[in-house]
Amino acid sequence: MPENTVLKNLLEAASEAAYQAGKITLSYFQTAHLEVETKADDSPVTLADKKAEQFIRQFIQTRFPDHAILGEEFGEIPGPSPYRWIIDPIDGTKSFIHGVPLYGTMIGIEDRRIEDAVAGVVYFPALNELYSAAKGMGAFWNGRRIHVSEVRELKEAVVLVTDMTHAYDHPKAECYDAIQRRSKFVRTWGDCYGHMLVAAGRAEIMLDPKMHLWDVAALKPIVEEAGGKFFDWNGTNGLYIDDAIACNAELEHEVVELLDSE
């Protein structure tokens, strides 16, 4: 089967899985007495996170039984296929817990032969917005092609950040400070929502001071297929990174210069 056909089929399946799992989260969203647990890393988790990931895992094992799976809540299942599905059932759990609709269900598909994500889906259940992309096929928002903005100067850029406290605690806090001070304005429309705003051309730079593989895998192919750049706070492009910056192509040079100078 041609590679493009394989990726198209994987993207369609990931989109279906993210959509259905996202709908599961809605049955818990903005409900009274939502139970919240605290994990070992002090991050919150709810029954909605667990139910959504369980659904996605079952979906994958039914459709692609030889594929590997890595999920935030239930760890890894090995598989002989070169493809590994990487799941974040609710990215933005804190937003979810507080009834804020800017949370997403994320699925990235990694091709372990090239050590990169080749497809990604982010579904925002409360907004009914689905972003998707596969390598070489472009990026889409609810079926419409999207592209990053063409803003060329930082002084005209909208900058987003997930958590300002974490940004100022980061070893390259001076870089964050320099970027946000030189920009047009800053907003904390964070987590996966911020990255998708960059991909759709509604913002120019998104800074995430703390990332895991399940945070990165779905976002990277969407931002890149939308014509954007995705790299860590050292300016290095890659899937296995601990922090991330998404930006439009026009501003990459200026942002990387600031990263190198701080």
Image: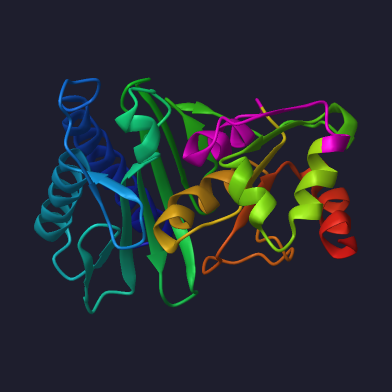
Taking 33 as reference, is 257 above or below it? below
Q: Residue 187: percent from the left, percent from the top?
A: 65, 28
How many tags in the picture? 0
- Which image quadrant: the N terminus? bottom left
Q: Residue 90: percent from the left, percent from the top?
A: 32, 42
Q: Residue 105: percent from the left, percent from the top?
A: 33, 40
Left or right, 252 with respect to 58, comes to right
Residue 230 appears in view: no
> Image quadrant of residue 24?
top left
Residue 178 appears in view: yes
Q: Residue at x 30, y 60 (%)?
A: 85
Left or right, 178 with respect to 188, comes to right
Q: Nearer the viewer, residue 92 or 241?
A: 92
Q: Nearer the viewer, residue 108 or 32?
A: 32
Taking 53 as reference, is 226 above or below it? above
Query: Which residues are the magenta region?
Result: 181-202
Q: Residue at x 63, y 35 (%)?
A: 198
> Image quadrant of residue 71?
bottom left
Does residue 186 belong to the magenta stretch?
Answer: yes
Q: Residue 99: percent from the left, percent from the top?
A: 33, 22
User: What's the coloring here?
Assistant: rainbow
Q: Nearer the viewer, residue 97 or 249?
A: 97
Taking 125 as reference, is 60 above or below it? below
Q: Residue at x 36, y 34 (%)?
A: 123
Does residue 90 belong to the magenta stretch?
Answer: no
- Which image quadrant: the C terminus? bottom right
Q: Residue at x 86, y 64 (%)?
A: 260
Left or right, 125 with respect to 4, comes to left
